[in-house]
Structure formats: structure tokens, C-alpha cells
Amino acid sequence: MEIIPAIDLRNGKCVRLYQGDYSKETVFSDDPVSVALRWQSEGARRLHIVDLDGAAQGKPVNLETIKDIVAAIDIPIQVGGGIRTMETMDQLFSADVDRAILSTVAVEKPDLVKEACQRFRGRIIISIDAKDRTVATRGWLQESKMIASELAGKMIELGVMRFIYTDISRDGTLTSPNFEAVAEFLSQVSAPVIVAGGISSVHHLIRLAELGVEGAIVGKAMYTGDVILADAFKAVRKVKLEG
């Protein structure tokens, strides 16, 4: 299982939100590049970057910061937040971003998802952000009536090969992932799944590895020290060996 540190960008700074609430922000660093270099130095093999301003405004806002991060590190990054046009995807891939994460367009513009999958294949990830199993869009500011697993099924038909599943009610809370919802989602989706939201200990990562997720995105717990990357890698590797 891949352990992927998260860098959430807002106003050019590295922040975390509580349950996706833009009014409940904690700033962890005003230098996202140094944060990216830190996670790389501690052994991360991939970074997860979200342009929070972009998610709310529907277009990239922190693109220059993302480019600076790409230029500074040697590991691949996946980027989400405000990616709602082919032009934006072209911009990101031209900047050597490895994967583009689509969310809102999965609900609002499925034809765009189909086109993106045809052009970019495995470089497209659909992020399904759910609360009580119902999908939220536009930077988590709007709720749809779509059930998470139903949306995933429709996306697979369009060519999507990978998903991120986030339980909004747990995100940034340092409580625990919604293991029941994760297990249910995994049982209903025939594609690799990366999980985010509520991960606050190595024990949580072990449980996710046992469930069979492809990866786990860790945000706030990395910044507070509740999860130490080296310890997490050892624990997850042990699960793999014992499995």
C-alpha cells in the first residue's frame, strides 16, 4: 500500500481544513516547496496536492506553486482542485504533473471524463468525496444526490482506472477513517482505490492495508507528528509480508 503525504494549497500556503470547511483552516507552512522536499526526504514516493482555491473557483489558482514543487522534487505528484477542462489538464501535464484528479466534473461533465480517459488513460483519477455515502462537489461546498459507489460504476464505464475515496466527515479531524464505508466502497468498485480522510495513526494505515486499498493519503497527521512516515512504511510492509 502506498502512503501518500498531502499538501493542500490555499493562498500559496500549505494548510489543512477541518471537514472541508474553508472557514476552519490551519496554516502549517508558508513554504509548500520546503514541505514537499521534507516528505520526499522522509521516503515518500508520491505526493498528493490539492489546489483548494482552485476547487472553490473552478480553475487552477496555485499553478505556479505546483510548478515550483514539481521542479524541486524527484518523485511524482498527483494534483486535484479545479480541474474542469481539457485545457487545464494539458497545463498540468505540460508542467510534468503525473496524475490529474477530477472530482466535480465526474458528476457534472461525464463526457469530459470520457475524453480525458481516452487521451490520458491511467493518468486520470476520479476523486469521490462523500458524506454519508453521498457525493459532494465544488470543493465540497455542494452536495449531489449521487451515491458514491453508483458514481464509481458509471466512471469505470467511461474508462476510469483509479479512484480516491474521501469521507468528508472525517477529513482533517484526526479521528479515524470510516472503515465500514471504505470496505463497502471497495466491495462495490472493481478498480484500485486510494483512501483519504481521518487517518491519524499507523494503526489506521495497517487496517486500510488489510482492507486492500491501493494507497492512503495522509494529511494533518503528518504535520502534527501523529504519523511518522518511516514507522508507517515499516508497519504497512509487515502487513504485506504477513499477508
Image (cartoon, rainbow, N blue to C red):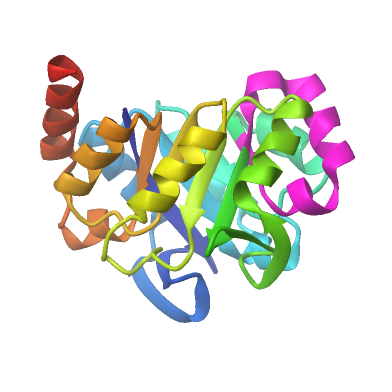
89 to 212, vertically: above or below? below
Query: Of 187 and 227, which appears nearest the observer?
Result: 187
Let me know if residue 150 appears in the view. Answer: yes
Residue 38 position, x and y percent, is: 26, 44
Return the x and y of residue 204 as percentages of the image width and height: 22, 48
Q: Work out whether 4 lies above or below 105.
A: above
Q: Which corner quadrant holds the N terminus?
A: top left
20 relative to 243, above or below? below
Residue 79 highlighted magenta (yes or no): no
Q: Which residue is located at x 36 percent, y 66 percent?
A: 172
* Stretch in magenta: 100-125
The quadrant holding residue 153 is top right
User: In the image, is residue 111 part of the stretch drawn in magenta?
Assistant: yes
Q: Position of residue 19 (x, y in %)?
A: 45, 71
Please tell me which residue is depicted at 27% across the width and 33% down the height of the picture. Answer: 209
Residue furthest toward the bottom? 23
Relative side of 35 to 64, left or right: left
Residue at 34% over, 28% down: 45
Name the residue: 71% across, 57% down.
146
Q: Quadrant of the C terminus?
A: top left
Q: Main secondary structure of the magenta part?
A: helix
Front in this rendered view, residue 133 or 23: 133
The percent coordinates of residue 156 (x first, y second) are 70, 29
Quadrant assignment, res 160:
top right
For the residue pair 54 and 231, the one nearer the viewer reads as 231
